[in-house]
Amino acid sequence: MRVATFLACFAGAAVGCLDGRDATIPASGTPYWFPQPVDHFGSNNATWQQQYFVNATFYKPGGPIYVHTPGEQSLTTRFVDGTHPTDLAQTTNALVVAIEHRFFGKSNPISDLSGSSLQYLTIENALEDFASFVRSAKSHPSDVFRTAVSKNAKVVFFGGSYSGNVAAWMRAKYPRLIQGAWASSAMLYGRLDYYQFDQSFGQHLQALGCAEKFSQAIEAVDDVLVSGSAADVVALQAKLGVPQLTPQDTAGLLSGLSTLYSMAPVTTAKDFVYDNVCSFFNNSSLAPIDAYARAIKAVISSDGMTEQSLRQMGDTSYGLDNYAIDQPGRSWYYMGCTWFGNWQTAPPSSSGLSRYRSQLVNLSYFEPNCQRKFGSNVAIPVDVSAYNAKWFNTLRGVSNIYYTSGSLDIWRDATVATSTGNLLPSSPSSPVFTIDGATHSQDLGEKQVNELASVTKARTIGDALVVKWIK
């Protein structure tokens, strides 16, 4: 299976996924469209159409409405027929609706992704999109859902990864509309230099026994990329099977390839990081750099990557002026530039921490592209302090939010449940639960064969909370 397809399956965004999905859940493949203004709070009152899918298979009168969004992904029917909210809908008589986020997939307020268009990609506008939808669904349910739904139906918002942010913010900002929120691996806390991403990956490698050798391989890579001659760099690129790019772009490409499986779900029978990374280092007499080369080449081969696709992934100058819609990576990059940062850098040399990506993957790798892609009006660096003051602090004291995060989640230290302690207090009304041994948003993904007991427990806790919220 191609890695990109696999990861989309894990996140609940594609067909042809792993065994373990409940085949009795029917697909709900009719797209619907909801009109929204370009700017809820400004003078641009032009309208656009926001895509959504509905699964009313399990709905019974008096049942709740479960709202889901793919967040930084394009919308597919799997968000209404292949994730945990749909499983829960079967036992709670719920209707499930998945709504695409503005400027992702087919839901575009303006028909390009230029900087001038993306000025309307704001947290306020995104949340008001969902709020407007829920208001209309509550007042005219038959028009929105094409089926009779109680106007008094309780609403619970679900989200994993960035969409977990949306779920939590919706409960905080619109408590009369949203009775509760399940925020899985929600990357709510902004950091400019997010080297904790690298350290979380290292913790996963350490659990699998290959962290030291992997870090040694990175040191060998940096010996060449940072200090080697041009000929040395070309030789290293050939050894690793990657195209000839600048040393910094090569470093960025390698960090992306080596962590490609890091968000894949872990089960009692399988860990994709072991299979695709640590297996090349453990039980081997190979030098670390040679094991690393085999791992990188294996990822490239398994995903069917070509030189062109590798260049597109690694060349930071690629597509700078490509403003076409349906480029999730471009919209997501804009959000990093203007909202929360969280640039996945290597730890600074002064930290004394082991590194699992090149030291060239630093702020100078990420930040210049903000203005190169979106124009000089984008301020560098992004003001993460202002973001946290407004959007993280708005969650303090809010009830009926369930925060979850995997102990092996590479985004863990941007969530409420960091590796050094909870950023918000866990309480009976808004518990914080760390899922031992799990990665990114496993509790809201599709059920896996040989699922971890900790994931099952996280779902059991969440299900009980949802039942309480919808009473």
Image (cartoon, rainbow, N blue to C red):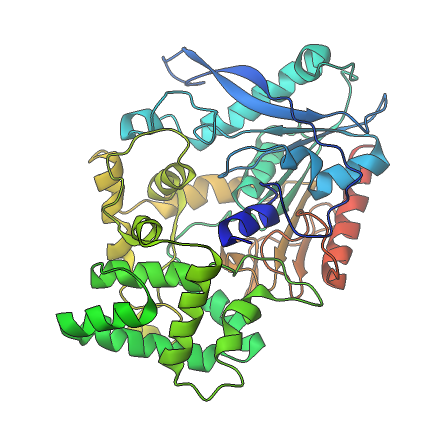
Q: Is residue 78 above or below residue 425?
A: above
The picture places residue 446, in percent across and down from the top left corner, at 69, 47
Between 379 and 357, the residue placed more toward the observer is 357
In which image quadrant can residue 399 be found? top right
Q: Seen in the image, is 217 located left or right of residue 91?
A: left
Between 168 and 242, the residue placed more toward the observer is 242
Asked if residue 177 can be seen in this view, the reply is no
Q: Is residue 450 above or below residue 203?
A: above
Between 296 and 368, the residue placed more toward the observer is 296
Q: Seen in the image, is 298 located left or right of residue 317?
A: right
The picture places residue 295, in percent across and down from the top left corner, at 44, 70
**Total numbered labels placed on residues in the image:** 0
Q: What residue is rendered at 60% in x and 47% in y?
A: 9
The picture places residue 91, in percent across and down from the top left corner, at 85, 38
User: What quarter of the picture does the C terminus occupy?
Assistant: top right
Q: Is residue 327 above or below residue 291?
A: above
Q: What residue is rendered at 74% in x and 57% in y?
A: 449
Asked if residue 459 can be seen in this view, the reply is yes
The picture places residue 336, in percent across and down from the top left corner, at 37, 44
